[in-house]
Amino acid sequence: MKKMLLMAMATLFAFSAYAQGRVVTGTVTAEESGDPIPGVNVLIKGEGSGTITDIEGKYSLDVPSKDTRLVFTFIGLATEEVLVGGQSEINLTMKAEFTQLTEVVVTGYSEFNKKSLSGSIAVIDEKALENVPVATFDQMLQGQASGLYINAGSGQPGTAATIRIRGNGSILGGNDPLYIMDGVPIEADAFAAINPNDISSVNVLKDASSTALYGSRGANGVIVITTKQGKSGATRFNYSGQYGITEVGDWRYDMMNTEERLRYEEMTQRSNGWAYSPNNPNAPDDAAEKLAELKAIDTDWAEVATQLGRSQNHQLSMTGGKGGTSFYISGNYFQQDGVLLGSDLNRYSGRFNIKNDSFDRLKIDLNSYIGYSDLNYVPSEGLSVANPMVQSLNMPYQKPIDDDGNYTYGPLGQNPLEWRDHTSNSRGELKANVSLNAKLDVWNGIFVSGRLGLDYRNRKSNQWRDPEYRPGSGVSNGGEGLYSFNDYSFFSPILLGQIGYAKEFGKHKLAASINSELIQKTYSGHNYTGYGINGKLPNTPGGITQGDPDNGFIASVGGFKESNALLSYFLVGDYSYNEKYNLTFSLRRDASSKFGENNQWATLGAVGASWVVSDEDFFNSGLISFMKVRASYGVAGNQDDTDESIGSYQRYGVFQNTSGYAGTAGIVPASIANPDLKWETSAQFNLGVDVSAFNDRVSLAVDVYNNITSDLFLDQKLSYTSGQGELRINAGEMRNRGIEFVLNTTNVQIGDFKWTTSMNYSYNDNEIMDLGQVSQFENGTSLVEVGKPLGSHYSVGWGGVDPANGQPLYLTADGALTPTYSEDNSTTNWGTSNPPHIGGITNNMSYKGFDFSFFFSFQAGHKLFNNQLYFIENHNVPYNQTTRMLDMWQQPGDVTNIAAPGYAREFSSYDIEDGSFIKLKNVQLGYTLPSAIIGKTPFSSLRVYAQGQNLMTWTKFSGFDPEIGNNIAQFQYPIPRIYTMGIDLSF
């Protein structure tokens, strides 16, 4: 009896143990295709432990009890939660997630569900940034969002693009947007050491209800960068690699070859072409022989100054977690050769992001990044003989290296091969960004949180010129080379404290917080340049000769240090009723050390509201599934966050050192104090509507806006008796108004074939409304004038060439023809350098494992000053010319735009050209291996692809590229065409 009782108890215990813990198995498939989904996270809710599905979509998991809930997650698919109950097999079909309503929008201080969002925020996800073969993430954003103007400006690897959000809001105060990475402000135009592959999303904040959160730094818009985060579950590895080549794109200048150059010289009766011409009565006896020697040489200096380079990118990342902790770790190597001689970039980077919410009420996360870039760069992109683009203007009948192995020198006196071999221009840059965040849920919706962040950059640059070659012998101090070194550091800590309340009451949601933030920025640096370089000690400071008045090798040294701070208190609040009626507001009080006591504090804020019309009972449309109306108004500020236009000590009268007083060192006044200087303020109104229709196959977002910037930073002219020529003050107004469209469509979805299109278009109308004490002033080649847009070209009008005598003709200010050139006839009738029309179009197609995409970007309605024409279409310079010069006027009756030789070449509207363009920015073809094949490998997914970047440009602009980043083309570094092949692996 006792033995039977023991057996019964053992059986009962075993059954009870089985009832409490069991193994659940199943298969996860996709709703659209029915295919199994590998890599789905299957997690036990509340514990963080779990597993992932295998290549056939299958999983097996030990669960503790029948009350266990399993959470199924996968990127791009809606999260599913299932109660185990008495089931031992749970098969699941996962649906695509409709991101229009469910995606989270990050503003840097808070997060919003997109359905309840009241502001105008463009979201660019990681898919738009993946595998693009450019060095900096900013260039990847071109054409990806409405209202976002991006111009590469330079093709030199690592160079930052020019970025504007809804036009230029300032004349002299800086127009760069504010950049935030994981809640920490980062430097603008310093992205060479940042790895774009770590970015999860980029949110572009455009209207006052979103930018006013940043108070006196938000008037130019805000770009919020969120990096990738870990996902709980088994550790997963991902490798992405690509390799390719870089080459010069379309070379739009048709320069003369040897035959054409000699013919041109004969026509103009100058140089070798005339000296050895059979039509020259004074030609030497051996003219025919000399001419034959020249014709035997035909050098394409554009090919000499450029190179075919390589590009490669390798990234290994891992993500996983357990028990409330998740992590993301990555390492990256990027390398790209420039298309001009002597230029390349190498970048090494690592990221470590970790989150922990395993504590009852405390959440902690750390986002950290470190990167190092090593850049060899072209020392000049302007009108300098150090620029390989300028050096390409040498004569075609000149060999780069003569028969004795010596460098040759044409009219420029320089040789690009010599500059490559006997100079050095390098820059090493270390970048670090850290964000440590903690949030404590105190009680019943009340929470406190804090953030400690740091943005740090150190840049070390050096230049070297070999004393035994032209670049070194041409140095002004002694003519025997140079070695220079520059050490620059930027250090910016941030401290944020927050007390908030977030609670749901039935259909009501309320969130509000009181915040305090302190940001400090410190810049420091020192530099020296030494001369008289010992040729046996190249590219090292050890080769510098001690300078004295006799040898002329007097070294130059310098240094600086400056610091400023911003203290802020602000209130942020959001209210939503049933996610149908939504209200958001912010009020911020900022104090900047850059401004004097009279205007040190500023009060800024905004309010926004949205109404989800489609949630109303009266809304009954079979076609439209979602409709929301948004509106916002507020005031943001600009204190020039780059600190370039408005320095750290603008309120003081500062001094600088000098040795210019009879050779005696001392200090002299550098600027006059202005304690009344204050922020520029931008009053911004936005009205928008979001619509989805045809079962969400079509979505449309339309925004109209009107932004007026007041108290512009302008320079007031002073009497020279003050010792200074001008004083920066606040005066004037400028307006930007426009309209934006974003259209997303699913064009075809039949069986395994799917074709989607995403389009965006923006129109911005800029007008200067007031300039204070004046109505206009010149600014470079443009005129800043009331009633005109910023960037209006200011030039004498071109009237063509007189057919009777070949003389150039110009226009008077009244539009009459005249042979007399006078700058007094300059007008602003030649358009603006800022494009009013911008946009982009992306098409994505997929069929089974194949995917294909192509992307166009465009800018239109603007003009560019092509300064290069003055040097390559000018009878009076000794450089090689374009073939258009062969169409010069030669006899009465000739109709041409090229004047006869002997007349002065003047700048005029002839040099102002249409800068509009359409670019085929990227084409990509990929293939993902099917599960039947990949299941036989150790990988969970494998995709291979090939792509081309900057493939074609359609434009009327005759320069190298219409993307010049400013208003005037001056032999900028050409943007390369890039071809790469790559592979993405998960395991």
Image (cartoon, rainbow, N blue to C red):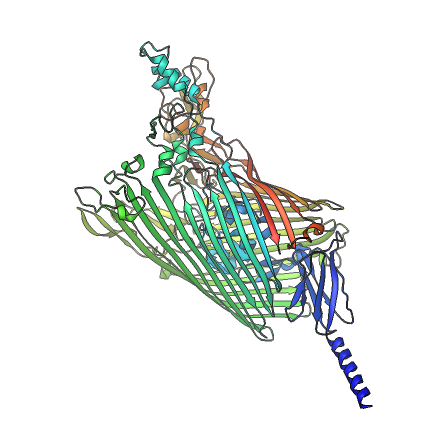
Of the pair 601 and 521, the residue shown nearer to us: 521
Q: Is residue 159 above or below residue 76?
A: above
Q: Could you tell me which residue is drawn at 63 percent across and 61 percent down?
A: 582
Taking the image as drawn, is residue 386 in sight? no
Q: Residue furthest front?
A: 3
Q: How many numbered marks, from 0 up? A: 0
Q: Quadrant of residue 567?
A: bottom left
> Quick check: 116 left or right of 864?
right
Q: Quadrant of the C terminus?
A: bottom right
Q: Is residue 291 above or below residue 569?
A: above
Q: Position of residue 106 (x, y in %)?
A: 57, 59
Q: Position of residue 881 (x, y in %)?
A: 41, 25
> Quick check: 640 left or right of 85?
left
> Quick check: 101 left or right of 831?
right
Q: Residue furthest bottom?
A: 2
Of the pair 644 and 302, the residue shown nearer to us: 302
Q: Could you tell me which residue is drawn at 41 percent across and 42 percent down?
A: 775
Q: Quadrant of the N terminus?
A: bottom right
Q: Position of residue 223 (x, y in %)?
A: 52, 53
Q: Is residue 215 above or below residue 485?
A: below
Of the pair 859 and 925, the residue shown nearer to us: 925
Q: Position of residue 237 (x, y in %)?
A: 59, 57
Taking the image as drawn, is residue 341 in sight? yes
Q: Could you tell me which residue is drawn at 41 percent across and 18 percent down?
A: 295
> Quick check: 416 left or right of 698?
left
